[in-house]
Image (cartoon, rainbow, N blue to C red):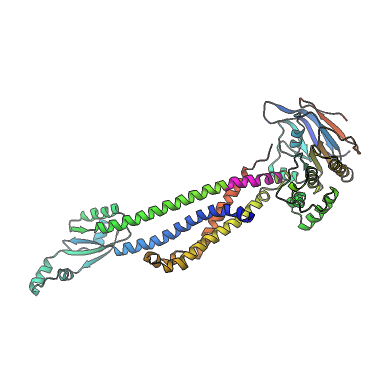
Amino acid sequence: MSENVITAKKLTLAYDSTEKIINNATFEIKKGDFVFITGPSGSGKSTLLKAFYGNLKPQEGELNIGGLDMTNIIKHKLQELRTHLGIVFQDYKLINEWTVEKNVVLPLWIAGYTADVQSSQAKRLLHHVKLTGKEDKYPLELSGGEQQRVGVARAMAKNPFLILADEPTGNLDEYSSNVIWDLMENACQQLDTTIVVVTHRIPMMFNIPYRHFSIDAGGNIREVH
Amino acid sequence: MKFIKTHLSLIFPLMAILLGLEFFIVFDRTTESFEKSLKNGYTMMVVAKNEMSIDDFRSWDKHILKVEEIKKSKILNSVNIDFEKEKGESLENSLPNFYSIKLNKYLSISELAEVKANLKKSEDITRIETFNSVYQSQYELFSFIKFSFNTFIVFMTIIGFFLILKQMEVWNFLHAQRMKVMEIFGASLFLRSKVLINLAIVDAILSALITSGIFFIIQNMWIRDTQMSILKENIESVFYLSDFFILLFAAIFIVLVAVFLVVINVKEEE
């Protein structure tokens, strides 16, 4: 039986005490799972993802990520956990004053890898996201699709055990979307990386087995696939 | 151009503070020696019925540093009247004792009045001349210059700090997004602020160097050509090498506090 990467027991998330965003959720996500989380706007999909990377503490219940209790996690442990996560944002969250290459290797730079390792890893990743030759460009010189591919490359730079993606192909062209899904499928299949994707719509052509959680307007989560 | 813009906005306010600090240090050093020369040049005259020793004077006031008896013959000579020898001797014997007194520091007018009042308590002392008006005009001019200068320094420092606060807002605007992204990917506080720390330390070093350079030029070029004796006499006090290290330490301390305040105020978005 494979190990749990994410375990939630009676998890309740809220920004204040009056309104619960995620209500009493219990689920387990195992190593190598590819999970889609869907639901209407405002249902709490992104909030759930934020809780996964420690941006929001559970109000009630338990949440365990990679063996760490997120309810009482200390800052130092949270920092360490984040160095093993890959996160993709809908608005890319790239550092605009840094080159594409520097953005991609951010997780490696934080982890203290040598410049040589960073450089070779950047070349490999940029080749995978079809951005070879754009190492020295700045994010604002790229199209939205290209920026998101940089974001995905950054998320995969340190071979994380868990990739969290918030609407990664939300406003992207078909080519960029396909590149991103291909990469994620490969990471899941070849590296056994756990991938959680929050999205409005599951892609039509998806080639690997996946799990599908749905959140309703009341913040209740159920597994539908 | 970008380099100049990025750095000058911190270097200017830092220099305002460092110039204030260095002016304060230099002014303190030069006025100390000026005060000393005023103190050394000042004496009060005391007339006493009986002979008095320095301990007698000190028993009345602690500010008495040195007592020198003025020879009666000298006083008679200064009057410049020809007496017969015998008459002169009897006149000399009938004269009271005259003392010139030096004080241990440059006193304010009120402190000087207090010294006078203390000495007057002695029954032996019949007259005290403090040469108040000369002393007062020197002291008041000196106090006024000192006050004006210190006010200017405080004003410059306040302006400098306000400009640094403005710069901190600019830093927040320019660096907050990068620091937030780095925090999401697990960067420590030090790594998140490294870019800002490097920038700030470079500016601190440049500011300390430029400020020291200004004072070095003042010392070695401007003062040597000036006719102001107070400056010429104290030319060595205008800039010591150790001042550069004081300025550097102050500049680094200020910028690190500023960087720290910016970094801890960058909160991760929820």
Residue A131 visible somewhere in the drawing: yes
Residue A205, x across and y down, in percent: 90, 37
Between A60 and B143, the one lying in front of the other is B143
Image quadrant where residue A184 sits? top right
The question of residue B171 being in magenta is answered with yes
Image quadrant where residue B54 sits? bottom left
Q: Is residue A137 left or right of residue B102?
A: right
Q: Is residue B164 left or right of residue A87?
A: left
The question of residue B179 being in magenta is answered with yes
Residue A27, x across and y down, in percent: 82, 32
Q: Is residue A28 left or right of residue B177?
A: right
Residue B254's place in the image compared with B226, above or below, is: above
Residue A67's place in the image compared with B201, above or below, is: above
The secondary structure making up most of the magenta span is helix
For the record, the magenta segment spans B167-181
Q: Residue at x 42, y 68 (%)?
A: B225
Residue A20, x across and y down, in percent: 72, 27
Residue B183's place in the image compared with B48, above or below, is: above
Residue B78, x across and y down, in percent: 17, 69
* Quadrant containing the N terminus of chain B in the rendered view: bottom right
Q: Residue furthest bottom?
A: B85
